[in-house]
Image: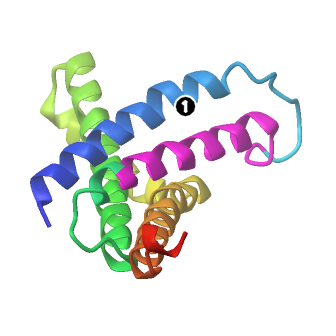
Amino acid sequence: MKIERMILIAFLGNYLVNNVAAGLASLVPATQGGNPILTTQYITFAVLAAITTGIMAWWYLKNMPSGGLVPGLIFGAVGFVVAVLTALLTGIAGVLLQTGSLAQVASVLPNFGPYLWQPTTAILLVVWVAPGALVGWMMQMRMKAPMASSMDM
């Protein structure tokens, strides 16, 4: 398992989720009122993000000699950690560039804890881990399936 390759693919996947999937989901008309998570726009984003992370998981797992559920889960977990750390570092860099003060950065850091307990963070976890596990499991099942020989025809 190449951890550097996993982190780089997860970082690319995080970029694609945050920019491409979010951009495509923004084309869906927004609905007013109600639960902000159960809108067609947010559900479209979650589906596109899951498809994107599934493609990233396939890309990482396709070169492994034995794809499986566990490597898929590990990829999903690493992708989730990369996404959370990217959000943290982006927030720190934004505050530092806007204010130029390390004291302001220190005052903003405690706000990151409540971010981790938001329902959207749980959705982010599912968007990364579930497709990785599913792709890994499907690749494992494909490897276990007996290959049909050309002599059977």
The quarter holding residue 146 reads: bottom left
Vertical comparison of 21 with 127: above or below: above
Image location (x, y in percent) of residue 40 = 80, 37
Image location (x, y in percent) of residue 57 = 38, 55
Q: Which residues are magenta?
A: 36-58
Position of residue 87 in the picture relative to residue 33 (left or right) = left
Vertical comparison of 49 with 100: above or below: below
Q: Residue placed at 36% from the left, 41% from the top?
A: 13
Name the residue tied to disc 1.
21
Image location (x, y in percent) of residue 79 = 33, 55
The quarter holding residue 3 reads: bottom left
Q: Is residue 49 magenta?
A: yes
Q: Nearer the viewer, residue 35 or 44?
A: 44
Q: Nearer the viewer, residue 44 or 135?
A: 135
Position of residue 81 in the picture relative to residue 125 (left or right) = left
User: Mainly helix, strand or loop, the magenta region?
Assistant: helix
Q: Nearer the viewer, residue 141 or 61?
A: 141
Q: Is residue 55 visible?
A: yes
Q: Is residue 109 visible?
A: no
Q: Is residue 103 magenta?
A: no
Q: Nearer the viewer, residue 60 or 82?
A: 60
Position of residue 129 in the picture relative to residue 21 (left or right) = left
Position of residue 126 in the picture relative to residue 37 (left or right) = left
Q: Residue placed at 26% from the left, 74% from the top?
A: 66
Q: Residue placed at 50% from the left, 60% from the top?
A: 131
Q: Residue placed at 10% from the left, 52% from the top?
A: 4
Q: Quadrant of the C terminus?
A: bottom right
Image location (x, y in percent) of residue 11 = 27, 42
The quarter holding residue 65 reads: bottom left
